[in-house]
Amino acid sequence: MIAVLVVLTQPVVADSFVNWYSSPISQSPPSPTSASWKFSHPAPPVSPLIPIMRQGWDLLVRRSHGKFTYKEYGGGVLHGQLEAFRALRRGISDYAICYGALEANGFEYTKALTQYGVAAQNPLVTTRILAELAPRYFTPEFEAKGVYYGASVASAPSRILTKKPVRNINDLKGLKLITHGIPAETAKYYGYTPINISFTETYTALQQGIVDGVIGVDPAFIAFKLYEQASYLTLVDIASGAVDLCINRKSFDRLSPQNKATLYSIQQPLMMVIAKKAVSDLSKRANAIYTKHGVELIIPSPEEMKQWNNIGLASQAPWVSSCKEQGKDCEALLKDIEQLKQKYNNYTDDALMDLAIQKPVTGIISTYNP
């Protein structure tokens, strides 16, 4: 077992991410039937995620020998951020970016990442964990809503970007903050007032003084240039989140065995590429970008961090209670996540990508086992 772990934690190639895109296409017989899907999402043109998604879909087309094609409908043309599930169930879309954590109910397990301290620091680790735990926890929630769960890519832990400094947890009291995916009841533990405004309107809300700041992630802060309107960034990991990919059940069931296999084989490596290129790598460059634009980076002292940790862990209580009311064991989910965080803590990004390619998790779609 130790030998296996040693092998897996070493990169197999210089860059597994580039290698995945450029690897030779299999000469196996193509599907006897064709499929053409609508890929929909609400993301604006500045989103760093979508260009990588397109690359993944283009690879899907090549690997299917042109038997699987797609047309992209972005910017909310087919549906908004909260309408993906309905659009998929009605056949308006075949494959869509969806957000289980933003749904009002039925996604108690999926909302685990919105809790303080749950996600790993490395979004690639969290992305692998989401895949491994999907068959037991997440797949049933999505399928109960009438869609197939495809995959998820984890965001980096959230930070606090504000117009005036938040140097300790008491400075949050009374602030109006835009939050996305963080449960509203969490706010009472920190003292801020949650404001529900879409990310595309966040810049204007900051500019006009409608809000005092936003709890979010570096890729979004940078893509929307929010640092132009808020000059203080508190480096505290309030929560995390994920972008989910959902599939129209009838569309998948109609695919040929060859096209099903091709689609399934693409998804987990693609999530790793997004986690690497659009989340992890961008986050590593973020502090330099903030500093260049005059943003003050506020790092809490060890004593202040104890207070953040105490409040953050206490804020999990409403979620755990809600899970119990719905007959779900979210405490067991937290334990499983912690065990997998320890398991993958020392894995390199390349090793995690290699796992997604060579040892993808099976059973994520309950009706299909490759």
Image (spheres, rainbow, N blue to C red):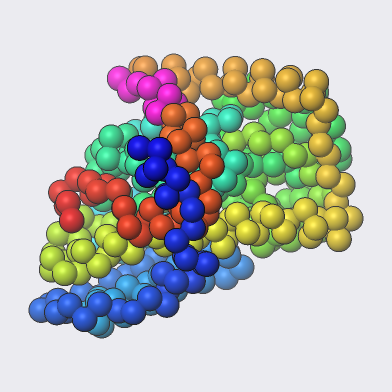
Who is closer to the viewer here, 298 or 161?
A: 298
Q: Is residue 319 magenta?
A: no
The correct choice, above or below, for 306 with respect to 275 in the image is above
Q: Residue furthest left?
A: 32
Q: Residue at x 34, y 79 (%)?
A: 24
Q: Quadrant of residue 327?
A: top left
Q: Residue at x 49, y 53 (%)?
A: 10
Q: Quadrant of residue 21?
A: bottom left
Residue 61 location (% of width, % of height): 31, 78
Question: Magenta segment, principal secondary structure?
Answer: helix
Q: Which residues are magenta?
A: 326-336
Residue 229 location (% of width, % of height): 81, 54
Residue 178 location (% of width, % of height): 66, 42
Who is closer to the viewer here, 283 or 108?
A: 283
The correct choice, above or below, for 291 with respect to 117 in the image is below
Who is closer to the viewer here, 101 or 291?
A: 291
